[in-house]
Structures are given as C-alpha cells and as structure tokens.
Image: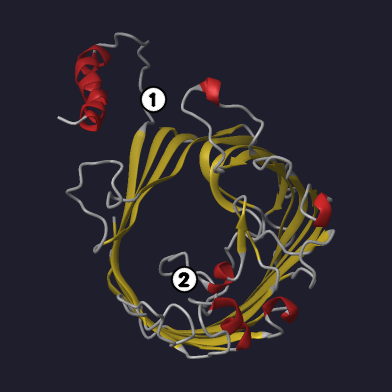
Amino acid sequence: MTAHLRRSRAPLVFLLLAGPALARGEGKAEVEQSPEARVELRADLQSLFHFRNDSDFDRSPPLYDESGQTVGAFATIFTPRISLRILERLRIYYEVELGLNYWSKQNPDQQDPLAADIFVLKHREIFGEGELGSGGFKVGYAHLRDPTGLFLAHWIGVAQGWIGLGEGAGRLGLFLGQVPDQTYEGILLDDNNFKRDIWVGGARYDLFALSERWRLCAAVTALVDTHLPEQARWVVAPSIHADLLLEGVAGYLDLALQAGRQRGQAAGGADQTIVAWAAQGGVTLTKLGWLRLEANLLALSPDDAYDGNRRNHGFLYSGKSRSATLMLSEDELRDWYDNLDERASSFSGGFFINRAGWLVGDVKATLTLNERVRPALVVGAASVLKPNNALDRAFVGAEIDALLELGISDYLVGQVVVGALVPGGAAAALFNHINRQAKDPVVMTELSLVLRY
C-alpha cells in the first residue's frame, strides 16, 4: 500500500473508531435538537456539450498543430445545496460544486488525490447565518457582491452583520473578508499570519423600497492587498445600484468608482495612483405579449497609453456583468472561464484589469411560445475605449446567438445554443496568436441538460 493511500485512510479509521463514542455523547456535550430543526436539500446536475471552430480569429496553421484548432468538450457539473435549519431564523448552509469535469480528462476511477485527472471539487459556500431581532449575521465562506457586482463578486471567507433601521428606512451592514491568494501559508497556525493577505471590507446600505418605483443599494468597499512584497495596493470603491420599476418596464443603473495607490508599479520604482470607474445599465420591456426585450450596456474605464507611468485607470473587474452575450462576456449557461472580457485583461490579486477598457452592448429578445418552450435571440457588440492599447484598433466584434430553452418537465430543462462572433481589428490584436491582422469568424454550439432536485 502506498504512503498516500495510508494517509487517506487515516481519517476514515478515526471516524469508525470515534463514531460509537460520539453517538453516546462521549468527548463532547450533547446538544438537544431544536424542535424546529429540519434539513433542506436542493441540487442541480448539468451535462454539457460545447464546440467552437477555433480559440482565436486566425486560421494560420501553427508550426506544430497535432491537436488542430477546434475547441470542444463534454462536461458534467453536480451542485448540491444543503441548508440545515436549526431554528426558523438560524441555519447552516453548504454548497459544493463537483465540476467542471470533462469526460475526456477527469477519471472517476482515479485513486491518487494528487493526480491531474482527479475530479474537480469546489466547496463554494459554507457559512452560518442568523437573524437576531432587527439585525442579522453571516460568517464563513460565502458569495460576496458589492451592489453592482462589477468590483466584488467573489467566493471568499467573510463575516457580515447588518441591522434594520426601521420601517421603510432600509438596512445598514458591515462586512470584512479575505480574498485567497497564492502566497504560501501552511496548515499549521504557526505558518500563518496577516502579513501577505488581500483584505476587503466596508459598509453597505440597502433601501429596498425608496418608493413604489425605486430601490437603492449603495456601498463603500475598501481593498488592502499586501500579498506581493513591496507592491502593496489599497483601493477605496464607492458603488451604487438603482432599480426603477414601472408597469411593463424595468430599468437599472450601476456605477462604481475606484481610487487608491499601489507601491512600486511606476517606472523607477515609484508609486502608482489608481483612479478608475465602471458603469452598467439596462432596460427590460415585459408588456409585449409573448415577447420580452432586454437591453444592457457595460463600460469599464481604460488606462492611458503609457504603461508604467504614475497613473493607472484600469478598473479592477470581477468578470461578472449583466451582459447577455455568451462569448464577449460570461456564458450564462455555464462559465467556461474563457469569455473575451476576461481574456483581454491581466489578472492580479483576484481581479481582472483591461488596459484597453471595454464597452459592450447587447439586446436579448425572448419569445414565450408556452410555459415550456422559449426561443431567444441575442445580438451584441463590443469595442475597446483606448485603441492605443490594442494596436490602434477599436472594434472588438459583433456576436449573435440563437437560444432555445425546452422545459421538458418542471425538473428537467434542455437548452440549445448556436452562435457566431465576427471579430474586428481589436479582437485580432488582443487574441490572435500568430497573425494580428486576421479576422476570421468563430462559430460555436452548445447543448445543456439540467436536472433539478
């Protein structure tokens, strides 16, 4: 028996030996179960097929091209969600994602936990949450968003608390969390400290009903990033989200600003000042009979044309927007982690920074033929806001996607997508590997089958 198998069996042996003692209440005080206690279980099982004719917009054959230029995969994701209700207003929540597991890569018979083909397992959320009087708390690993989601939309360790301010006065909250980084910290406490961490914290105000037509959320978020020696970064980011609800029309607006400083980033080792912004807005029309129209627009500020000077205007971006496009922005059927707004950016301390800036607009039309059949069409286009940082090219490309959602039953949903992206000069400059002038279109298709428990 190998050493790693002996180690993997040790916890199981411990549980087998300790089980009877724990059942008798030995080793810890027994806690009487609440009469309100219950278990709530939800789960999604999604199987996917995805195919694209290329990963960039250039068909130039590379010198070595054993695997060809197409991109494709079958994959499966299992996402169980367990809520342990201790009391009606007190619970433990656990969400895990088994995937994204590719049929051609992950091996369900693999026993080595360090092997490259072991199943991908992500423990997404593990937190305790409760309401106390007019307030509440959430502590553990959770999904944290600022009001816009453009800056913070991360799964992180976080502590949150809030208090209601009275009828119609909204809710005020505070939060403090840590974004994971790659600086080594060991298993033992002696190997851990707060010297090389990425902190986020701040205050948030939610006014759920400014009037019958308006809702408002606002926050001030601070980022303190010291995970790189001599390159500490701090940012203060106020953000606001507003909803307008009218009969048959809904609109929203997101605004976020960032101001801060990072050490040692300018030429000669000087500090760099950070001043950046992001804006997002949209309108939804619902009173058109069977037709539903949605329009969105997103803009991320660009840096200037001089990399390494004393100012940086690139927005620290979460990668999460409300754009309906599937290639220019995140694919809503499943995030494949290769959307163009992220690929055009560098990645630093948990955030994407696009020096060329980003502007993407889209319109989605959904037709409800009946409660189980819903075809849709998405048309979108993107450009950069600073062509100097994209070889003096501005237009990224135009995307069109046809979607069909089939509600086979209340618990079984199928989705089919066929799409194409016609690139512009900026896409050729930012994404092509060989010929930075080539503008060959990319076509893709995607199939999804979701079972919901």
Which mark is first along the chain, 2 or 1? 1
**Residue 33 image position (x, y, % from top left):** 35, 22
Residue at the farthest front position = 63
**Residue 4 image position (x, y, % from top left):** 25, 32
**Label 1: few (<14), some or many (≥20) within 10 Å?**
few
Viewport quadrant of the C terminus: bottom left
Q: Nearer the viewer, mark 1 or mark 2?
A: 2
| Mark drawn on residue 34 | 1
From this view, report whether residue 7 is shown above or below residue 273: above
Residue 412 in which image quadrant: bottom left
**Residue 367 image position (x, y, % from top left):** 44, 86
Closer to us: 306 or 419: 306
**Residue 270 image position (x, y, % from top left):** 84, 51
Closer to us: 290 or 238: 238
What secondary structure is marked by label 1?
loop
| Mark drawn on residue 331 | 2
Residue at the farthest left position = 1
| Residue shown at 34% from the left, 55% from the top | 99
Distance (Cα) linking label 1 and label 2: 42 Å
Viewport quadrant of the N terminus: top left
Image side of residue 156 versus residue 59, left or right: right
